């Protein structure tokens, strides 16, 4: 049977060659888009799709075997398709990335091979191959921690606060640093210095420590006051590419004590002693008056 079919292919060769049509089983494949973006940020679907077209330029009905390699990514594609004479068939190749995987690219290779033509095996048929590029897209994500979320300080003292900035994204990123309420604190007579206003951090790396140097107000007054120091870190990639600034703010509470004069704390005690002495003096005057008029003395206070 195989010899007979091969004879038919060979006999048809002269006729179809004259017509510009392939005399032997053949398949062509093309995929679009050739670049497949895959988002892998938390909550993303993490999938990308390309649509491939298998084209049969011959007079045979072909069963075409589909083979896919995806550079280590999970994928889904049909194992085979049937393509009629002078017809084409469209199939999907879907790839799936891992959650939060690193930014980068992977090559997807799609191969199509004619298994049978008009029901007859074709062991000599060659494959047609096409490549597509999967791009794992970058996303921004960050965390900020305060070493000391609460601090009590005296007026006119210098102190250094430290904050940890984490890059929880999937690619190298720069983070811009600022004090979100700097104007408010400076209006309250704080002095603020940032030794560095940005830092670059590898993804999933240990945090960078950022310092904020402050001097508390020199004229605090008699009362205590609470202030908020708002440390803000912003992903530069989010501003440049994502269109929405991705930032984190961490607050530190500052308790600045008022000014106390030496010995000021004993004044309340002295006041109570003076009040007690006045009461005793009045009691004694009442007793002396009662003796002069012969009346009974008043009852004791205690």
Image (cartoon, rainbow, N blue to C red):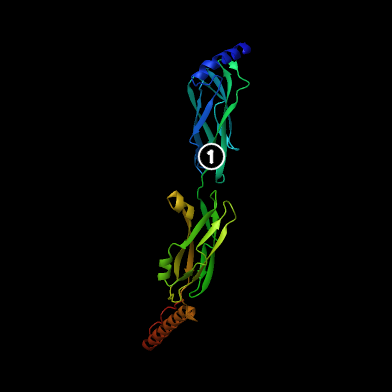
Q: Residue at x 56, y 36 (%)?
A: 108
**Image spot of residue 152 (x, y percent):** 51, 69
Q: Nearer the viewer, residue 144 or 256?
A: 144
Which quadrant of the view contains residue 70?
top right
Q: Residue 84: tell me if it is visible.
A: no
Look at the image and tell me in which quarter the N terminus lies: top right
Residue 42, compared with residue 289, is above or below; it is above
Q: Nearer the viewer, residue 206 or 269?
A: 206
Residue 85, compared with residue 100, is above or below; it is above
Local crowd at mark 1 within 10 Å, few (<14), some, or many (≥20)? many
Q: Nearer the viewer, residue 185 or 297?
A: 185
> Callout 1: helix, strand or loop?
strand
Q: Residue 10: tell me if it is visible.
A: yes
**Image spot of residue 104 (x, y percent):** 56, 45
Q: Nearer the viewer, residue 152 or 134?
A: 134
**Image spot of residue 88 (x, y percent):** 48, 24
> Relative to 83, is 221 on the left or the right?
left
Residue 292, compared with residue 25, is above or below; it is below
Q: Residue at x 45, y 49 (%)?
A: 242
Q: Residue at x 42, y 70 (%)?
A: 186
Read off the residue under disc 1.
Answer: 134
How many marks on residues? 1
**Image spot of residue 235 (x, y percent):** 48, 54
Residue 247, compared with residue 226, is above or below; it is above
> Relative to 285, is 111 on the left or the right?
right
In this view, the residue farthest toward the left is: 293
């Amino acid at each position: 049977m195989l010899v007979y079919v091969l004879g038919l292919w060979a006999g048809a060769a002269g006729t179809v060659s004259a017509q510009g049509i392939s005399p032997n089983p053949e398949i062509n494949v093309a995929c679009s888009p050739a670049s497949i973006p895959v988002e892998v940020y938390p909550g993303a679907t993490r999938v990308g799709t390309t649509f491939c077209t298998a084209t049969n330029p011959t007079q045979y009905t072909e069963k075409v075997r589909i083979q896919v390699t995806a550079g280590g990514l999970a994928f889904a594609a049909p194992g085979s398709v049937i393509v009629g004479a002078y017809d084409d068939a469209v199939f999907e190749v879907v790839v799936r990335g891992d959650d939060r995987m690193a930014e980068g690219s992977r090559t997807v290779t799609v191969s199509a091979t004619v298994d049978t033509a008009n029901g007859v095996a074709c062991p000599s048929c060659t494959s047609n191959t096409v490549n597509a590029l999967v791009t794992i897209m970058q996303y921004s994500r960050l965390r900020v921690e305060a070493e000391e979320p609460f601090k009590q300080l005296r007026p006119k003292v210098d102190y250094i606060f430290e904050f940890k900035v984490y890059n929880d994204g999937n690619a190298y990123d720069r983070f811009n640093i600022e004090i979100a309420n700097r104007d408010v604190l400076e209006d309250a007579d704080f002095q603020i210095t940032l030794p560095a206003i940005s830092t670059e951090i590898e993804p999933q790396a240990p945090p960078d420590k950022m310092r904020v140097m402050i001097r508390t107000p020199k004229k605090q007054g008699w009362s205590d006051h609470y202030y908020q120091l708002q440390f803000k870190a912003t992903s530069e990639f989010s501003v440049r590419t994502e269109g929405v600034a991705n930032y984190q703010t961490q607050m530190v509470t500052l308790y600045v004590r008022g000014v106390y004069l030496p010995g000021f704390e004993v004044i309340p005690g002295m006041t109570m002693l003076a009040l007690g002495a006045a009461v005793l003096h009045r009691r004694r005057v009442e007793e002396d008056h009662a003796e002069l008029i012969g009346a009974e003395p008043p009852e004791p206070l205690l």
